[in-house]
Image (cartoon, grey):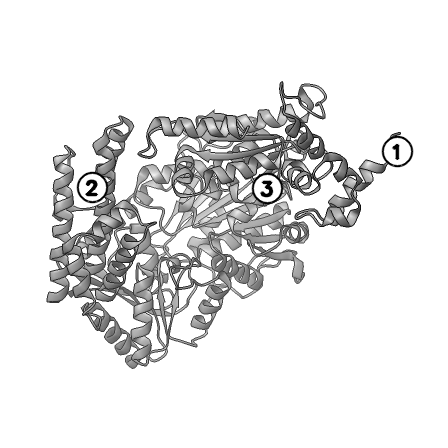
Amino acid sequence: MKYLSHPLIRPKSLEERRYQLSIALRALDGNTMVVLPTGLGKTVVALLVAASRLYSHGGRVLMLAPTKPLVEQHYRFFRRFLLVSEGCEPEESDFVMLTGETLPEERAAAWAACRCCFATPQVIKNDCLAGRYSLADVSLLVVDECHRAVGNYAYVFLAHHYNTTAEEPLLLAMTASPGGDREKVREVCENLGIETVETRVESDEDVRPYIHDRDVQYIDVYLPEELQGALIDLRRLVESRLKHLARLNFRVPKPGNLSMKALNLLNAQIQQRIRMRDPSAFAAASLHAECMKLRHAISLAETQGSEALKVYLARLGVEGSSRSGSKASRRLAGDPQFQRLVARSREWTEELHPKVAITTELVRAQLRAHPDSRIIVFATYRDTVQMLTSHLTAAGIACERFVGQAAKDAEKGLSQKQQIETLSRFRDGEFRVLIATSVGEEGLDVPSTDMVIFYEAVPSEIRSIQRKGRTGRSGSGTIVVLVTKDTSDEAFRYVSQHRERAMISEIRRMATPAVPPVDQPVPAIPPSTKQTSFEEFAGRGPAIIVDDRETSSRVVERLHELGAVITLERLEHGDYAIGDRILVERKTDRDFMDTLVERDLFGQIRALADAVPRPILIIEGNDLFTARNIHPNAIRGTLAAIAVDMGVTLLRTEDADDTAAMLYVLAQREEGGRGDRKTHPRKSYRSLREEQEYALASFPNIGLKHARMLLEHFGSLKAVIEADLDDLMAVRGIGKKTARGIWDLARRPYR
């Protein structure tokens, strides 16, 4: 075996593969997307490029991955093989892993000391927005699973920020499956500033020697009579809803062709008529919601089994009988045909779908023939994962589930720490079967996975390729896809096969020629696009405190681009604080209406008004009067109550960029752009009660809320000022520091 040779890579530690060297050399010339099938060593390419940049440019390397298990995986790989200085063992601080579990001040200190940082993108985005450190000296940014760089995902912001502020930027993007949609791939390339695309597929001459055989098998599965009967009932329920929609003059799909695409087209018709204030459209929206629920039930019956369907039907029944349940759930739960189906499902005492027995037998046969095998079973739904885990465990097969972090009903998810520990035990052979949802599709580093079972076919070519990539990495492997006959399983099987072929064809077209034509040079980022550096930005723009739950919004990104100095904090009220007078609550028009109907909008706005002298509510968007089926006069009455009764300033903006521009102007004005601020901006009229509240609210750390509580407790302004410290602290919400501020200010001589 010939080993990789580089001054910053441990000697005789990694096999040399010519295609990896070739890709790495191209990637050193400019921002590059690398598309390699899973198992062909994208991380090795990243290591080669990182070692070369550290050797020639110094600085530091930042590698981003979407999940903590992936971050931890890259961290372990680089620590094992990379030397950050020639001939020297790296220090402990040279490699650092940053996730949301690391405190902000610890992240800043770790960043300052490290040479290689491995992180989730949202953490780095938050730190850049808050100005905790700069990416100016990052000589290489690696973006793993780069197909996620669309929309408002953190990769998009970070790539733009890095490409325009780093001293010598170089970006390496990596994915096994960019997707077959040419426009989406172009969007990813544009968002990341990609200049070159390097691709390989398994049939390429320089890759073929490293490919192991993978046997793909499709097993046909037939539904039992009980589930076929349930499907008939569900389809009849769908048909009755579609007929009702047709009577309301909507174009509806055929009951047997109820795809998500067809339902989305139907919803587009409904939303258009809602905007036109058509009363029938609101009833249609509820019927559409019923169709969505029934389609999901059909999918469960076809592909998952009776247990998953029974749990879902019971859940719908509970939701429909609850006061907080939606109108669609209540009407569906009240349908006699639905009630009969629910009653019949309660009689199912064991799993009816043949897939469970087939999966158990496939796993048992593989382990019988090869006891050291590692097997991954992929299932779409968490209920199915739990059910399979129970069945395999009951059959005496050691297995564990691998799901996301979110809790679902009474079932807890796996924390990122638990995910990492589970993968480690699986890798070490403590158990042989991993049963995973989609969280296990991206980037799992599990050597020698001998078998992958698809509990159902998936229509996404990206997910299909990533699942298949879990086997055949270091030896031959088997892929088994369970396909229920005459169901969506069959359609998804052929859709994913077609899309995979289309994606491979598109990947070949994407590849950038090694030597571009003379009249079409490889594009480069012109020097003139380089923006002001981080250091030059510091202190230039107005200061805005942003609630840390807002960082995923485009508003915060745009504020950063405008040059605002952002501080991230957890705000008790509002989303943006400007100075000590202004607190801004931002709501999209849909969020405003949802809060009005389903939550305590007035309580939220009242708390905002009590907190500061200048409360502001920004409503973003142009669909306020069409977002929900509520009479326009009721909405106008709400706006009037907020503005007049509560004294909250109402501002309307078009979109997130417009909101950011408004906040920026507010912050500029507040920082003195219009001259010195009056200590007490004066209303044209205040009642005596308001004057008393206002005077006391001007004391340090008081505000209107605490001023009212103090006045109600003591009865007069004079009594508050003359009260001793213990009496002041007896008032709820008044601590020692605040009480001392009142007492000291009232008695301090004026000089």
| Quadrant position of residue 321 | bottom left
| Residue identifier under label 2 | 262
Secondary element at image label 3: helix
Taking the view exactly as shown, the residue that stands out farthest to the front is 715
At a point 26% along the width and 61% down the height, the residue shown is 314
- How far apart are the two marked residues, 3 and 1, measured between alpha carbons? 45 Å
Secondary element at image label 2: helix
Please state which of residues 577 and 136 is positioned toward the viewer in this rendering: 577
Q: Nearer the viewer, mark 3 or mark 1?
A: 1
Q: Is residue 717 left or right of residue 36?
A: right
At a point 59% along the width and 43% down the height, the residue shown is 571
| Residue identifier under label 3 | 128
Query: Identity of the amino acid at label 2?
Result: Ala
Image coords of residue 110 (percent x, y) = 65, 53
* In the depicted structure, whether residue 287 falls above or below residue 659: below
Q: Is residue 624 left or right of residue 331?
A: right
Query: Identity of the amino acid at label 3?
Result: Cys
| Residue identifier under label 1 | 749
